[in-house]
Each structure stands twice: as structure tokens, then as C-alpha cells.
């Protein structure tokens, strides 16, 4: 089972952002975003696209379906 919601938190922390910061970017409430990170609600596709653009990664990588190669990380 893919538990992608852990990646939501991982990348948010790597970028030094709070849940409130991400909620503002996604134009939603912090409480709603928190449910995405906890796996209590499915995150909408349009939010996944926004986050992948913010973090400069593919949606596949954000979902944990693809890992960056060392060449791509450079």
C-alpha cells in the first residue's frame, strides 16, 4: 500500500514550510491540509499538481511511485 501522505509532510518540512503555509498556497484551511498529511482525506489532483510544481518534483515522485535518480537530483 502506498502511503503517499507521508511524502506530503516530508517535502513540506524539507522546504521549511508549515501546514499553514501550504494551506495558503493551496487556498484551503490548515485543518484541511492536516487531514491530507494524516491520510484522513484524499488530496485533490489539482493540489498534487500545485505541490509537485512547488517542490520541483513529479507527481509520481510526490506519490512515492518514482524515485529520483542521482543524475536527476543534481
Image: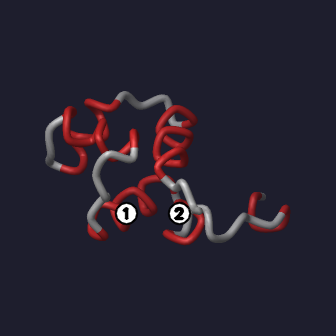
Residue placed at 15% from the left, 48% from the top? 27
Quadrant location, the C terminus: bottom right
Dot 1: what SS? helix
Q: Circles 1 and 2: CB distance less than 8 Å?
A: yes
Q: How many marks?
A: 2
In front here: 39 or 74?
A: 39
In the picture, measured across the screen, residue 63 lies left or right of residue 39, that is: right
Question: Residue 62 location in percent, x, y?
Answer: 53, 60
In the picture, measured across the screen, residue 15 lies left or right of residue 65, that is: left
In the picture, measured across the screen, residue 24 lies left or right of residue 72, that is: left
Question: Residue 36 location in percent, x, y?
Answer: 33, 47
Which quadrant would residue 19 be assigned to in this image?
top left
Tell me if mark 2 has few (under 14), some (14-19) or many (20+) residues whose alpha carbon lies within 10 angstroms of its own: some
Residue placed at 37% from the left, 63% from the top? 48
**Residue pointed to by mark 2:** 63
Residue placed at 59% from the left, 62% from the top? 1
Residue 29's place in the image compared with 61, above or below, is above
Alpha carbons under labels 1 and 2: distance apart: 9 Å
Question: Extreme right residue here?
Answer: 70
Residue 52's place in the image compared with 5, above or below, is below
Question: Residue 45 location in percent, x, y?
Answer: 31, 70
Question: Residue 69 location in percent, x, y?
Answer: 81, 67
Which quadrant would residue 30 be assigned to in this image?
top left
Which quadrant would residue 61 be assigned to in this image?
bottom right
**Residue pointed to by mark 1:** 48
Tell me if mark 1 has few (under 14), some (14-19) or many (20+) residues whose alpha carbon lies within 10 angstroms of its own: some
Amino acid at each position: 500500500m502506498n502511503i503517499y501522505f507521508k511524502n506530503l509532510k516530508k517535502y513540506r518540512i524539507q522546504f521549511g514550510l508549515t501546514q499553514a503555509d501550504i494551506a495558503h498556497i493551496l487556498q484551503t484551511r490548515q485543518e484541511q491540509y492536516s487531514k491530507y498529511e494524516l491520510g484522513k482525506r484524499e488530496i485533490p489532483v489539482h493540489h498534487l499538481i500545485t505541490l509537485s510544481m512547488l517542490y520541483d518534483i513529479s507527481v509520481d515522485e510526490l506519490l512515492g511511485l518514482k524515485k529520483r535518480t542521482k543524475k536527476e537530483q543534481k
